[in-house]
Amino acid sequence: MPQPKPLTDEEHAVYEWQIWTPGFGEAGQEKLKGASVLVSRVGGLGSVVAYELAAAGIGKLVLAHAGNVKPSDLNRQLLMTHDWLGRPRVESALRRLKDLNPRLDIVPIPENISEENAESIVSQADVIVDCAPLFEERFAMNRQALQQNKPLIECAMYELEGQITTIVPGKTPCLRCLHPEPPSAWKREFPVFGAVSGTVGCLGAMEAIKVISGLGEPLAGRMITYDLRDMTFRRRNLLRNPDCPDCGAIE
């Protein structure tokens, strides 16, 4: 993790309520200020992750998302607005986050993660939060997180269900342990409520804060799943696959 950065008087005033949290304090806030997080896709999940991290005082956000805002984005992508239809998503995200936190350093990348760009994009951040819908993107990030020894917070949702786990290279199962191949039934477009993706987005932001600051216990080697149809939440332990093509040889 990077070196903590001292807080200004303004930052003390903005973040004082969370600084009061036992186990976090000013030292935790300084760690957030010194850290950078990659959010892959700032859609239904990533918009909320990025917004909560900006509100919490993260020092730098790297935002990777291709394409322009379209009407169907507006039911869940909270960093997109009606007046930005037809214009780049990452630019909409940047202006909205800067309105909230003008001190924030933002690197907008108008691309989705791929095998070709994953190495360079992942190298720009200390922690990765995966909010991408496609397994090709998720596998590319998983490999680079392992190779670059960076924590990866893996978020996903479908319909009224969501899940989250934190991958620590060499210590926990990775994404390929859980999904050796992309699920054959998975589709790019799927049923979604903004409140469902926003729920796991808040959890993902909190996991990033915990990983960076040392607060509490991250979901390393564990997964939370939920179904908001009946408000059922479950936690289960995960096992590494010793033959995993991505993390099997990492110690």
Image: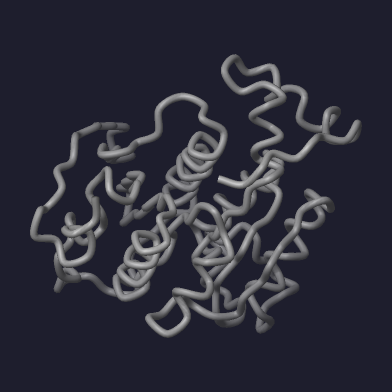
Q: Is residue 234 left or right of residue 239?
A: right
What residue is drawn where x is 61% and y is 23%?
A: 24
The residue sitting at 26% across, 58% down in the picture is 175
Decide if residue 250 is on the left or right side of residue 72: left
Q: Residue furthest right?
A: 9
Image-quadrant location for residue 19: top right
State how many labels appear: 0
- Quadrant housing the N terminus: top right
Left or right, 65 with respect to 153, comes to right
- Give the quarter of the image for residue 227: top left
| Residue drawn at 78 percent across, 49 percent down | 100
Residue found 65% across the figure and 37% down from its top: 31
- Front residue of 162/206: it is 206
Q: Residue furthest left?
A: 243
Residue 81 x, y percent position in the rendering: 69, 66
Residue 37, image x, y percentages: 57, 54
Q: Residue furthest front?
A: 251
Image location of residue 232, percent across then percent down: 27, 32
Q: State whether residue 165 is above or below residue 63.
A: above
Residue in the foreground of this view, choosing between 12 and 159 = 12
Residue nearest the viewer, comparing 158 with 163:
163
Tell me if 159 is positioned left or right of 185 in this view: right
Above or below residue 77? Residue 181 is below
Q: How is the image coloured?
A: one colour
Across and down, in percent, residue 239 comes to 14, 43
On screen, 28 above or below 34?
above
